[in-house]
Image (cartoon, helix red, strand yellow):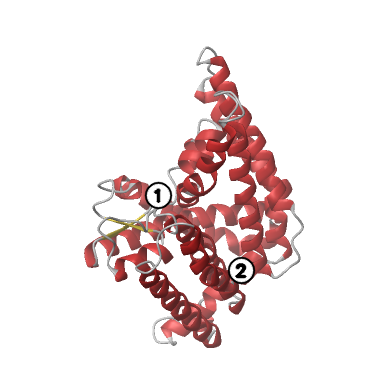
Amino acid sequence: MEGEVNNLIFVWATALISLYYCNKITNLIAPGTKRLSAFVPVICIFFYLPIRLTTVHLAGTTSFFITWLANFKLILFAFDKGPLYSNPPLPVSKFILTACVPIKLRSENGGSKSGSKSPINYSLKFVVFLLLLKVYNYEEYLHPLVKMALFCVHIYVVLDVGLAMVAYAARAVVGFELEPQFDEPYLATSLQDFWGKRWNLMVTGILHPTVYLPVRSISGRYLTKKWAPFPAVMATFIVSGLMHELIFYYIGRLKPTGEVTWFFVIHGLLAGAEVVGKRMLGGRLRVPAVVSGPLALGLVVSTSFWLFFPPFLRCNTEVRSCKEFMAFLELVVRRRFVAPNDVSCPY
């Protein structure tokens, strides 16, 4: 674990130095392809850095924040767009934080969705987390797919509650707010609502300007207004699938099978068809939310079990993450508060 911490320090120190370079080089190069060319070495470095990490939590988080979000933000910034662009320019400290961490300044949009949720909301999710820990003690009686489903719920509640705690600390200490990660995805009324407004909103926020809008602008020249969004939606989901495939590789170091990409291709086809269908019908036919919501969630769950979860099962993500948590606990606590024999991993 200590060796992994040293690797983490190297990775993030390299990332911070690289972002400092990007901030300063923009004073010398005008926006456009020349500035993008100056960013290419940093983008390549950001694709390499997660290889230095081997744990599920650190490799997954670092690849998401640096390889995906930071790289896409730099691509936008090369053309004076995106969250890194500001007039006047952002101070270097705020530039680096905005680039490599999913945060936004307090002045942007006034507040965050995650900050508007009630304490009861987070308390209930914390109770769910505690119940999951209890259920893990009986994992030998659970079907592998059931365990994977429970693990996904685990990920959701930990991210939602954990990011809310970090957001509170950020507001109190440095005046930053985290971008909302989720907006109660189980309340989605359609696939468009699920992917566009409720699930993994940081990804939605970065894919929209980097992929959807450029493709939408091109397709609008050749297709009618009703059909123009379809190629843009498909392109967005394909890029998301490829980036998820890459992150899964960083986590498991297994040869990509394309399953995750196909998962997003299928949902791109369905979500794109939904968008086009709504435009063609013009609101004349509306499926009640009580019907469309369960259908959308059922589709997400069933296709996840088919294509999204198997890569997790093959690289033993739930087993490794549990062991990592125990190793971290032992490293931090140093046997002063919790004796190692008092805490057990269900795996």
What is the quadrant of the C terminus in the image? bottom right
Q: Is residue 273 above or below residue 199?
A: above
Q: Earlier in the sequence, mark 2 or mark 1?
A: 1
Q: Is residue 347 visible?
A: no
Q: Is residue 344 above or below residue 29?
A: below
Q: Going 42% across and 83% down the picture, which residue do you hit?
A: 333
Q: Going 63% across and 68% down the picture, which residue do you hit?
A: 251
Judging by the rendered image, the residue that carries numbered circle 1 is 124
Q: Residues within 10 Å of mark 1 (few under 14, many from 20)?
A: few
Judging by the rendered image, the residue that carries numbered circle 2 is 346
Q: Is residue 277 left or right of residue 103?
A: right
Percent across and percent down for residue 8 are 50, 80
Percent across and percent down for residue 9 are 46, 82
What is the quadrant of the N terminus in the image? bottom right
Q: Residues within 10 Å of mark 2 (few under 14, many from 20)?
A: some
Q: Amino acid at mark 2?
A: Pro
Q: Going 72% across and 47% down the picture, which residue do you hit?
A: 262
User: Disc 2, disc 1: CB below 8 Å?
Assistant: no
Q: How many marks can you see?
A: 2
Q: Is residue 277 above or below residue 42?
A: above
Q: Amino acid at mark 1?
A: Leu
Q: Is residue 42 visible?
A: yes
Measure the C-alpha gap from mark 2 to mark 1: 23 Å
Query: Considering the numbered disc 1 on the image, is that residue within a helix, a strand or a loop?
Result: helix
